[in-house]
């Protein structure tokens, strides 16, 4: 079986971003050490508003991280800041292309 490549999408049951309510229905690989669908507690970033989210529950849904989780995420996962920046740039490109 072929392992997903970095950036490959995994389709997920649709759920709304708790910040902007954009419907999210896919997750992309953001870490070369993990493959496949996200697990409970995995970190995600909304493609629309670029806010950091956490997967929880069954089925998995996205929620806002707590303040302590957010501090831990930023300290433990250094590439999160780069991912947030990339999501902001992608959003800006979409807005420019739409105008």
Image (cartoon, grey):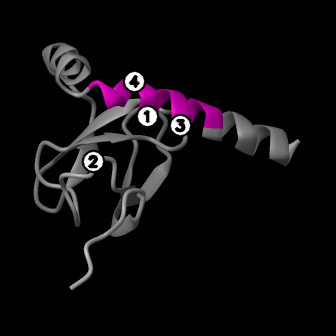
Q: Secondary structure at mark 2?
A: loop
Seen at 34% across and 30% down, the residue is 79
Task: Pick whichever of labels 2 and 3 is earlier in the sequence.
Answer: 2
Mark drawn on residue 55 = none
State if disc 3 and disc 4 touch (CB < 8 Å).
no
State if disc 4 and disc 1 touch (CB < 8 Å).
yes
Task: Pick whichever of labels 2 and 4 is earlier in the sequence.
Answer: 2
Q: What residue is shown with label 3?
A: 87
Give percent across and percent down for residue 91.
Answer: 64, 38
Q: Rounded to the nearest whole Å, what is the CA distance between mark 1 and mark 2?
A: 11 Å
Q: Rounded to the nearest whole Å, what is the CA distance between mark 1 and mark 4?
A: 5 Å
Q: Secondary structure at mark 1?
A: helix
Q: Which residues are magenta?
A: 78-89
Quadrant of the frame with the N terminus: bottom left
Bin the neighbour count of mark 4 within 10 Å (Cα to Cα): few under 14, some 14-19, many 20 and up. Answer: some
Quadrant in the rendering for residue 53: top left
Q: What residue is shown with label 2?
A: 31
Seen at 11% across and 60% down, the residue is 58
Bin the neighbour count of mark 2 within 10 Å (Cα to Cα): few under 14, some 14-19, many 20 and up. Answer: few
State if disc 1 and disc 3 touch (CB < 8 Å).
yes
Mark drawn on residue 83 = 1
Q: Does residue 88 belong to the magenta stretch?
A: yes
Q: What residue is shown with label 4?
A: 81
């Amino acid at each position: 079986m072929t392992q997903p490549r970095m950036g490959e999408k995994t389709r997920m049951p649709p759920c709304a971003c708790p910040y902007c309510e954009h419907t999210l229905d896919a997750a992309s690989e953001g870490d070369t050490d993990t493959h496949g669908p996200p697990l409970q507690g995995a970190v995600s970033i909304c493609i629309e508003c670029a806010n950091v989210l956490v997967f929880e529950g069954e089925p998995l849904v996205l929620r806002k991280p707590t303040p302590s989780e957010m501090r831990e995420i930023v300290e433990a996962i250094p590439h999160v800041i780069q991912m947030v920046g990339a999501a902001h740039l992608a959003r800006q490109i979409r807005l420019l292309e739409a105008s």
